[in-house]
Image (tube, helix red, strand yellow):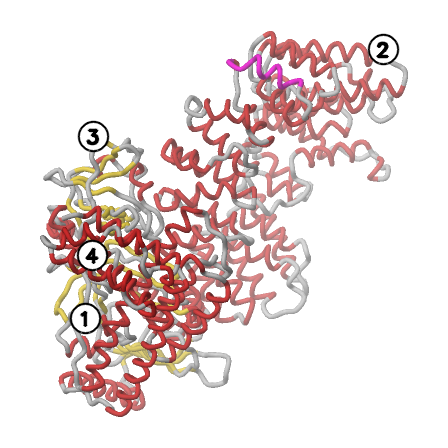
Amino acid sequence: MIAIDEAFVDAAAPDTDSSKNGRALVLKNKLSNLHISDEGDILFGECAGSGKTPYSCSADFLRPDQPTYRCSCPSRKFPCKHNLALMYAYAQKKPFTPAPVPADLQAKREKQTARVEKKAEEATKPKKVNQAALAKKVQAQLDGIDVLERLTHDLVRLGIGNMNPKIATDIANQANQLGDAYLPSARVALHRYTQLFTNPYGTLEKQSTAQAEQTHTEALTLLAQLHAIIKQGRTYLNKRLEDPNLALPTDSSIAAWLGHAWQLAELKAHGLVETDAELVQLAFNSHDDRARQEFIDTGIWMTLGNGQIRVTQTLRPYKALKFIKSEDSFFQVAQVKELCVYPGGLNPRMRWDAMVPRPLEAPDYATIRQHARPSFAAAVKEVKNTLKAPLADKTPILALSFQRIGKVGDTFVVEDAAGERLAMTDTGMAEEPPSCHLLPLLPAEALTGQVLLARFHHDLDTQKLRIKPLSLITASNTIRLTL
Amino acid sequence: MSIPVLTQVYQEARRLAVAGSVVAHGDFRLKKLLPALDQAGAKAPVFAKVAESARAVIEGPEEKASESLLELTSLVTAVLYTQGETGCPGPLEPITSIALGGSANISARLLKEVLEALTNTGSGRLEQVKDAHERGLFRDLRLVRAAVNGLDDPYAEIAEFLADHVLPLYGSAVLPDVRAQYDPKGTKGHPRRLRLLHKLDPVGARELVLQALESGSKEVKVAAIGCLGAADLPFLLEQASAKAQDVRAAAYQALAGVDHPDAVAAISKAIAGKDIEIVTDAISESTGNSRLATLVAAQIETERDTLLSLRDKKKVSVCANRLRFLVRSVSRWEFPGTDAILLDLFHRRDELTKIKGEHQSGADVAEAVVTQMRLGSTALQQTLARSHAQLDAQHLDEAVRAGRLSLATSEFYEQFAPYLEAPLAGKKKGKDPTSEKRDAVIQGLEARYIYYYRGDRHETIPPLDPRWSDLAVRIKNLPLIHAAPPGQAGTEAYLWQEFESAMQKPKLPDEHYQLLTVIVDHQHPRATDAVIATIEKIAGKKNQNTYTYWFYSIIQRLPKDAIPRLEALVPQLKGADADMLINAIENLRENH
């Protein structure tokens, strides 16, 4: 039997308008021939639209953790308002009569089942590679690396401090060429470089001395990162050219830097999968990445089984905003059968196909708190080891068990049971809004003996490793400080 | 490990990268670090590697300088990343917690919408901010910074709303942020910041207030003057003579709150001069004190005597105007002296009315007195209300309003109901004093129109005696039925009879929507039937749009059990009619 309520349908809607329109269709009585299969695993019916013939829509719960929505309407939203209307009608206990699944729908279901089985089967088989196309692509990437190298060296030769509108335009044009050379990350890094010197409207602006100093440091870090992409990328691509069957590296993120978009099947094939994982979201933020021309919704999660902090990322390119559902904060436990984890880093990206929620309860909080690092010294060591890799994420996240949070002068400081301290700051971490100023607004008990989810940042100008507070986890609550 | 030398190498590499690697070859500053690196390299191989990289920059081929410089930077930063300094020496002081609560599991999507309303420009934002305030979203700490930044919102009403209603919720917790943003030389948001700082922490803001007075912008200075009190009397007295009018106005405002002979003397001087309008404004906004009340009463008395003795129309006009300002300044005070002088003027209103001036006359003073009595103490209101028989139609509506606020509901009915049923003299309606008085009473009862918006004003007005309902039915006054208490059997029968009669007409009369409003607002037992019957009658018909918005809005006031019946109606409607009804149902659901 299908167990869904209106909240489930609300959450499934790609946006609030679709949800509103779906409800309106139910009220307008636009649905007809409402049925549920004899097995109770698919809802189907018809929904009147503007044309003469009603749309045939269905919500298939054959895989309850991954429903399939089908509709004959031309909407590019999934589920469309007709699917949502169908589910709202069911959730509102409108009469759905048992009926055999129509032949065409049954055929689609069978095709899908076959497709899923085939996919599972294919996932176990080695993937056939079009050698000629791959060689062509790798060669294009190598050529792109040459262009990137020339560009990077030109920038260093000219000097970071000598940026002018002409250079900025040249870099932007060349960066776009790198996109054509299958090096999207290099393109983004170059756009990020020019954006360090420009305002949100894209024009160069005079910066204050302090701003300019910070910009120069960030620019040099980006150039060093590009240098690492060039070196590591060239080595890897040359090997790949020689051996087209070379496995994708899973011990570093170079494949992703070179534009490889990991498929779930690939991740599974490489063994980057955990089964029956339970995840709790500890922080969530949504930010506008101008260099990528995308909005990025980032969830920061802890896996209850092993305490790993990992991230989910939904990338919403400006051009496709209408069609991609924005993510929201999640306050339950996500039960995931197969959790795919990307290679590299302290906080790798993760994805899943299907998830079933369950309420977040006191024992879950206890587990989270148990996984938090009790020793700052050990945590710092781990962070430092991560940071030294040239292509590593420079702002890793850890959950820290602390004794107390207080102030030394104007600086917020967190201290562990051994008296080790970490200073807090908002500088250098623009992904989330500032959060340190929120600490005095917390209840006193939240500042003693709790768990802090913290993002680390090493400031090359001051040579200080400091943290930004993202959330506080008490025995019964997660106090989120960022958005 | 010799970290300082590595830090120096990084700084030099950074310097060269900023200047351009063309100047890197043979760079003497980097060269100077080589011996130290070599020495350290003997103990730790990583230093030897750094030294080698540095040499490649200084001594390598010039065309390779960029690459060498990047190589050196990568190597040094990789080492420095492992040497980041942590800790923070010194005594760890506890944080003074304000304890606003937590994030209360409010969805990020919901908060983002509020953040966008606070950070963007465009219409409809004030409603979003007010709605967020009502829903308690501002209790979430993550909105604090945006609320503080909102003090500079280009739409002043949003900034004022945040300053008056939202930011005080956070108490002293927002002081550091507000203070950090505060610029005494600034305009717009900065006077607001100073007033907020003073409101939240008068003692702590004292220094800022004094600094603003010393070197603040004009706007900030004016705000600072408003933050002063008795301790600053000499300064306030000085500012009361300032050239700028807004500075003087702020000084008067502060002086009106100070119970001191010198303050009163300064106000007295201002009353005697050209500043009478701004000083009386300041007095009217103050809570008053007996010294000030005595002064104002004495001034009114003097001006009254002068006015009564004048014959020159120009002088009358000037004097009447001054007297009017003075009378208006005592609103909401309850001092025997001012009450007595207002009563005196009230009793002399015939005398005053006879005095004619060029622009202002004694009649304007009489009118101001009547208005002030309505706004004044309960005793004044009662006197005005019970004097209704002596009042002409012009002042009768003020007496009705005063009576509604001050008399018992039964007395209020007995005093004013007879006006509505008094027989007309048979003259033309506009010229008949009985008809004029009837209109004035209806005006005073706010029963001239059916007010769609049930604003806050109704909450402060006492309910009417139930007998008004029967009276309203007898005289067939729908707005008065609307204003009278609901639940009277006679009224309900009358309303339904009117409704049925309207429904029999081929086209609904314009007044039908008003009738429907009364039926719904009175929670008539058949209100839902009436609404549904009306929808069925107008659905799909043309030229019914005039009152559509009103009509669908009153649906939101129906009882909860109307929802399923209205939902069942939706399929019968088409296009915009269906969408409007769906929206109305949605709002009705939210209201319950």
- What residue type is disc 1 on? Cys
Q: Residue drawn at (39%, 74%), measured in percent from left and top?
A: A77
**Mark 1 falls within which chain?**
A
> Which residue, given by chain and number where applicable, does mark 3 sit on?
B91
Q: Nearer the viewer, residue B330 or B260?
A: B260
- Which residue extends farthest right? B312
Q: Residues within 10 Å of mark 2 (few under 14, many from 20)?
A: few
* Quadrant assignment, res A4: bottom left
- What residue type is disc 3 on? Pro
**Mark 3 falls within which chain?**
B
Position of A297 relative to B244 (above/below): below
* Quadrant assignment, res B292: top right
Counting the numbered discs, the total is 4
Mark 3, secondary structure of its residue: loop
Q: Which mark is residue B122?
A: none
> Which residue, given by chain and number where applicable, does mark 1 sit on?
A340
> In 3D space, how far apart are the residues under numbered discs 1 and 2 (Cα atoms)?
97 Å
Where does the magenta region start and end?
B231-241
> Which residue, given by chain and number where applicable, does mark 2 sit on?
B309
- What residue type is disc 4 on? Pro
Mark 4, secondary structure of its residue: loop
**Mark 2 falls within which chain?**
B
Judge left or right: residue B140 versus residue B255: left
